[in-house]
Image (cartoon, rainbow, N blue to C red):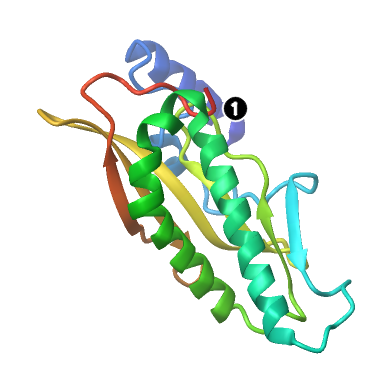
Amino acid sequence: MKNWLQKTLIVTVALLTLGAISPNHEIWTNLQDKDVSKHAIGPSQSNDYSIGLADAVADDSLEDNSESIEEQFITSAKKLSYMKFGTKVGPVIANEFDSVIFPKIEEAIQMTLASSGDLHKRRLAISEKPAGDYSEKIFNVYDLENRKDLIRFHVRTEKRPQDGYFYNFHYHIAEDEFTAHHSIGDIYWAKDTPPKWLS
């Protein structure tokens, strides 16, 4: 869709629905072309936690290095998750996130790293800045050489009638071209509208 036409459509719908469908609503990503959607855009050059051994001197024990790479990804993932939650959401959901959700995120990261080939020859990175407002992105793990994502972790705010708001944690993988939602779990917020991310 032409860029000017899409922007006009977004503004028109936002005005007609009195803001119920905002310009950053999920419906707009479905209208965009696959290669133009905001989820398909590669991570920015400056926002990287680069993790890999291409520049490092090889040690005697390669297993220890691969474990340290996994540990670095896990540490960065937890840090970015809490950065996304901010000071309003983080303290409320921290216990359930640490005990239920994060072990599954950790497992998905380990599975991706294991399936991504020889860690000692590849340069992988984790995106540095989670998305704010009501956007889903927590972080992406991607290959630095070809700038393509391997796995994308998201959290979606869902309003369920009669139940209230839930945070739905899920991820997308490159093998299915990021189309399927691989569910991690849900955390209940409350019946009140949750605050924006990063707040």
Tell me the residue at 45%/33% (across/down): 90
Q: For this view, does 81 lie left or right of residue 183?
A: right
Q: What is the quadrant of residue 124 in the picture?
A: bottom right
Viewer can see residue 107: yes
Tell me the residue at 34%/10% (across/down): 18
Tell me the residue at 52%/56% (across/down): 152
163 vs 88: above or below: below
185 vs 5: above or below: below
Frontmost residue, 176 versus 108: 108
Q: What is the quadrant of residue 20 in the picture?
A: top left
Frontmost residue, 12 versus 39: 39
Provide the residue designation for mark 1.
4
Residue at the extreme left: 162
Mark 1 falls on what kind of element?
helix
Question: What is the x, y in percent for residue 101?
Answer: 37, 53
172 vs 26: above or below: below
Frontmost residue, 178 versus 128: 128
Residue at the extreme bottom: 60
Question: What is the x, y in percent for residue 126?
Answer: 66, 55
Q: What is the quadrant of residue 193 in the picture?
A: top left
